[in-house]
Amino acid sequence: KAGVTQTPRYLIKTRGQQVTLSCSPISGHRSVSWYQQTPGQGLQFLFEYFSETQRNKGNFPGRFSGRQFSNSRSEMNVSTLELGDSALYLCASSLGGSQETQYFGPGTRLLVL
Amino acid sequence: SQKIEQNSEALNIQEGKTATLTCNYTNYSPAYLQWYRQDPGRGPVFLLLIRENEKEKRKERLKVTFDTTLKQSLFHITASQPADSATYLCALEVGGSTLGRLYFGRGTQLTVWP
């Protein structure tokens, strides 16, 4: 089985721009979660989508949004980028039930200048 | 407030010794607890899951304990090797209305030196 893939792997943007990140889950997985990872804050949960519906949401401003398509692929969008948005963005897929392992992708490294 | 704390950000031990990492939590009632390993520039990789009614779980050189009274999990790596050097993350699953969500600690960076 192919693992979780994320595109692009690296991205450089300037303040005020917007960005869209993509995540393709493992085949058969219906849940996709997004995390922001920074050295100071660790892994912070953004949101989780299950069967095209946002099921959980973290404490991030509305500039961060996401969606999930019928094939379970997910996108995350950040509008009006700020310097503090520079981070590693990770997505993880799972079957979506309890006790499920989350399988992480390699991440997208975003740098905001 | 809810917190997940992992002992010291960094832990350095000599090869062959047992590494013990701690995960303490407050104001959570986790149904399950998971441990992940993360190498630099990569996403976390699942290692072990332990349920609230389990005291201990083992997998090869890894052992996890879960004490819901102390609100603590211990993660042990026996006969540690330099290849075990990585950041280890604990994650809680509460379930219920947050089914599908994991709450992560900040991780402990383990370095095993020869």
Image (cartoon, grey):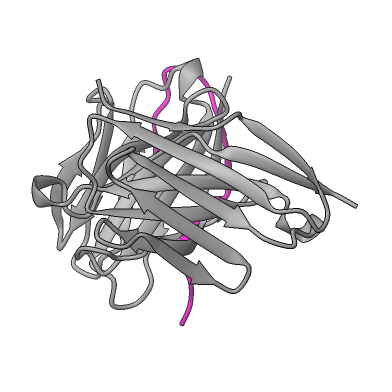
Q: In front: B42, or A62?
A: B42
Question: Please, is residue B44 above or below residue A11 in the view?
Answer: below
Left or right: A53 with respect to A98? left
Residue located 48% across and 71% down the image: A3
> Is there any visible trace of residue A98 in the rendered image?
yes
Taking the spot 57% from the left edge, 28% from the top edge, the residue there is A39
* Residue A55 as seen in the image, left or right of residue B109: left
Residue B46 at x, y percent in the picture: 48, 62
Quarter that holds the C terminus of chain A:
top right
Q: Position of residue A67 (x, y in %)?
A: 22, 49
Residue extent of the magenta highlight: A1-20
Residue B33 in the image, given as x and y percentages of width and height: 34, 53
Residue at the extreme left? B97
| Residue B102 placement (x, y as % from top left) | 31, 47
In the image shown, does A49 or A75 lie closer to the viewer?
A: A49
- Give the residue at x 42% y 46%: B73
